[in-house]
Structure formats: C-alpha cells, structure tokens
Image (cartoon, helix red, strand yellow):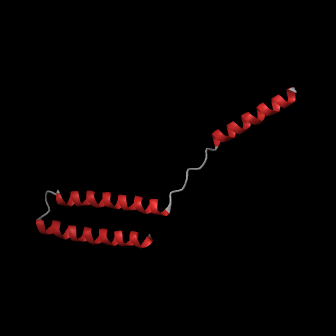
C-alpha cells in the first residue's frame, strides 16, 4: 500500500515538474493573421515616414512632393505584394 502511494506521488510530482519546464507551445498565427499584422506594420511605417517628411524643417515644397511620390510608390508596391500573397 505504501509503495502505491509513494509511486503515485512521485508520478504526480514528475509530471507537474515536466509541465513546468516545458509549457505548451503557443498556437501559430494563421496566414490571414500574419498578413493583417504585416499590413498594420506597413501602415504604421508609412504614417511615421510621411509625418517625418511633412514636418522636415529644411525641405522645400518640391523636395517634399518628390519624397512623398517616392514613398507613395513604394507603399503601393508593398501593399500590392501583400494582396498577392493572400
């Protein structure tokens, strides 16, 4: 009887210790979740770069216009690539 109790106790402790060492793996995000995450990052990056360009103290209007054209072109191509992956 004592052996059974001791074995059960040891088995219970070993499984709880093993579970503490190796937590279950987090679920992997789906493809759509990854794409939406990338789109949010792209939008955030675009908005910060746009703000930096528009608030630059030394850039002229023509320089800002040229930089915004380049930024918009790059943004559109990256958005198109993300849509193609879907």
Lateral position of residue 28 relative to residue 79, left or right: right
Quarter location, residue 47: bottom left
Q: Residue at x 22, y 57 (%)?
A: 52
Residue 45 locus on image (x, y percent): 31, 59
Is residue 29 depicted above or below 18 in this figure?
A: below
Quarter location, residue 39: bottom left
Lateral position of residue 21 relative to residue 41, left or right: right
Quadrant location of the C terminus in the rendered image: bottom left
Is residue 62 depicted above or below 34 in this figure?
A: below
Residue 1 locus on image (x, y percent): 88, 27
Quarter location, residue 17: top right
Q: Residue at x 27, y 72 (%)?
A: 73
Lateral position of residue 50 relative to residue 39, left or right: left
Is residue 5 depicted above or below 56 in this figure?
A: above
Residue 24 locus on image (x, y percent): 61, 47
Residue 60 locus on image (x, y percent): 11, 64
Q: Residue at x 72, y 34 (%)?
A: 13
Q: Residue at x 40, y 60 (%)?
A: 36
Residue extending farthest left: 61
């Amino acid at each position: 009887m004592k052996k059974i109790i001791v074995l059960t106790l040891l088995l219970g402790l070993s499984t709880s210790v093993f579970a503490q060492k190796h937590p279950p793996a987090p679920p992997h995000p789906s493809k759509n979740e990854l794409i939406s995450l990338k789109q949010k990052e792209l939008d955030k990056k675009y908005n910060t770069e746009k703000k930096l360009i528009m608030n630059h103290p030394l850039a002229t209007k023509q320089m800002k216009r040229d930089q915004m054209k380049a930024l918009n072109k790059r943004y559109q191509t990256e958005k198109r690539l993300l849509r193609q992956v879907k």
